[in-house]
Amino acid sequence: MKLQKNYKFWFCTGSQDLYGDECLKNVAEHSRIIVEQLNKSGVLPFEVVLKPTLITNEVIRKTFNEANIDEECAGVIVWCHTFSPAKSWILGLQEYRKPLLHLHTQFNEEIPYDTIDMDFMNENQSAHGDREWGHMVTRMGIERKVVVGHWTSKEVQEKIASWMRTAIGIVESSHVRVMRVADNMRNVAVTEGDKVEAQLKFGWEVDAYPVNEIAEAVAAVSESDTNALVDEYYDKYEILLEGRDADEFKKHVAVQAQIEIGFERFLEEKNYQAIVTHFGDLGALKQLPGLAIQRLMEKGYGFGAEGDWKVAAMVRVMKLMTAGMKDAKGTSMLEDYTYNLVPGKEGILQAHMLEICPTIADGPISIKCQPLSMGDREDPARLVFTAKEGTGIATSLIDLGDRFRLLINTVECKKTEKPMPKLPVATAFWTPQPNLTVGAEAWILAGGAHHTAFTYDLTAEQMGDWAAAMGIEAVYIDNNTNIRDFKKDLMLGNVVFGK
Ligand code: MN
C-alpha cells in the first residue's frame, strides 16, 4: 500500500546570533551537507527538508507553527550545532504538536587535535548546546526521540529511519476511521472498550453501520464486475476443490468477490480505512466475509473480527507505519488459537475463522471452500497459506477501564513441524519471547487479548514510542522479561497511568 500524502521531515538546526556571521554561515552550510547526505544515503524512507537556522524566539515559534500547519510535514528533527539558549524555544515547543526527534550529532566525527582552537570549540559544541535544549524538552514534559551518534553512521541513519515510521503512525493515527458493521460479539469482554476515550487518545473515529446497509452495497455490484474479479482470483491463486463440484465452488468464490468490491466501494464512499465484522450478525450477506476481508487487508485496510474495533484500528496504524517498506514481510490481525506444548517445540498456532492477511504468506496461496462450523451461512471461500518465518511483534491494545494499555510481545515465527492438510485456514506459528511459559504468563497477567495486531516489519521500540506519543501505557514482553520484574512493571503502570 501507499501513503496518500508525500510526507517529509523538517531539519531544524538551533543556534544563536552571538557567534557572528561567519559561524552562522558555517552552521547553515554544515546543516545543508548533513541533510543532503541523509537524503542520499538511501536509508531514510522519507525526505528530509532543510529549514533556515533557528536563532531567535520569533523564528523558532514561526517554524514550529508552520510545521503544524504543513500537511506534508510529519515531524521535525532538531540539532543544536552551537549553543542555543533554550528559553527561546519555549513558545515554539509549547505550540508544536507533531513528532519530534532530537538528533544529537556533531558535524565533525573526530576532534581535530592538531588545529583545534576556541573558535572551533564555539562553533562545534552540540555536546553543550544539545544538553541545554534537551533540558528544556524534558522540563516541558514533551515526548521525543533522542538519537545519538555521527550523522554518517549507518546505525544512526537507521535509527532516524525507524523513528520516521513511528512518526507516520503518530500523525496518521488521527485520520483512522473504523467502520463497525454490527456490534461486539455477545458477552465478550476484551474486544470492548471506550470509543470516546479512543478518539481522545488516538484520534480514531469508530462508527457503527447496520449490516444490511453494506449488504445492499454488495448486492449492487454487477455480475460482470464480480466475474472479472473471480477471473483475477483464479489467475492468482491455486484452486483447491477438495472433491467439491467446480461450478458450485466458483459460485461460492464469486460471493466473496462481490463482497470485496461492494465493501471497498462502501468504505471508500464513506471514507473509512478499517472495518469490523461479526460472524453472528451477517444480515443479508450470504457468507461471512473471508477471502474478501483478506484481500481488503492486503490492500491496507485495518480489520478486526467480532466487533474488535481496537484491533482493526491497530492493524490499520501498523500498515500505515510500514507503507512502502522495501522487502516488507507483512502485517495482519491474528488470534492465539491452540498450543503445541511438547517440550522443546512449544508454540502458539495463530489463525482465525478466515480473516488472515495474505501479506504474511510464505509461498503459494490457495482458495478453499469449507463449512465455517459456526453461524448459519453458506460455506465461505477463503485464502489459505502458512506465514513466513522470522521475528515479529504481536500487539494487543486493551481497555482496563481507567486507561488503555498496549502489550508488545516479540515473537519468533516458525514453520509447524508438519503440514496440517485438514485445517482450512491460513496460519502462523510462533514461540513468544522469552519462551512460551513466561511469555504466556506475562501476557495473561497483563490482561492481553486473544486477538492481536501482528507485524514482521516493526519493532517493539517503534510501537512503544508510538504508545508514548499517544500518552498510554506500554508493556514489553521479550527476551529480557522475567515474571518478578514484569509484575513490578505492571505495578508501576498502575501508579503512573491508573486513575
Ligand atoms: Mn476471534
Image: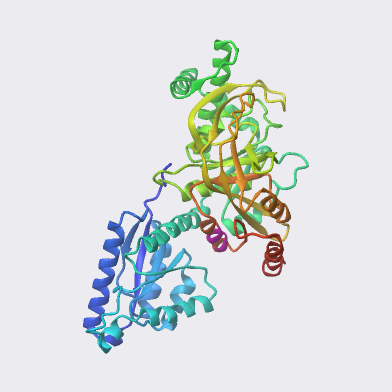
Does residue 461 lie above or below 222 as drawn? below
Q: Residue at x 23, y 77 (%)?
A: 25
Q: 215 and 226: which one is in front?
A: 226
Asked whether the viewer can see residue 340, the reply is yes
Q: Residue at x 64, y 41 (%)?
A: 345
Does residue 14 lie above or below 154 as drawn? below
Relative side of 187 to 497, left or right: right
Q: Residue furthest bottom?
A: 118
Magenta residue check for 467:
yes
Q: 238 and 280: which one is in front?
A: 238
Q: Quadrant of ligand 1?
A: top right
Magenta range: 464-468
Q: 216 and 482: which one is in front?
A: 482
Magenta residue check for 51:
no
Residue 309 location, quadrant: top right
Query: Where is residue 384 drawn, in percent x and y?
Result: 56, 28
The number of numbered badges drawn on the structure is 0
Judged by its main secondary structure, the magenta piece is helix
Does residue 338 lie above or below 396 as drawn? above
Query: Where is residue 381 drawn, in percent x and y?
Result: 58, 23
Q: Quadrant of the C terminus?
A: bottom right
Q: Residue at x 46, y 58 (%)?
A: 167
Q: Quadrant of the N terminus?
A: top left
Asked whether the viewer can see residue 74, the reply is no
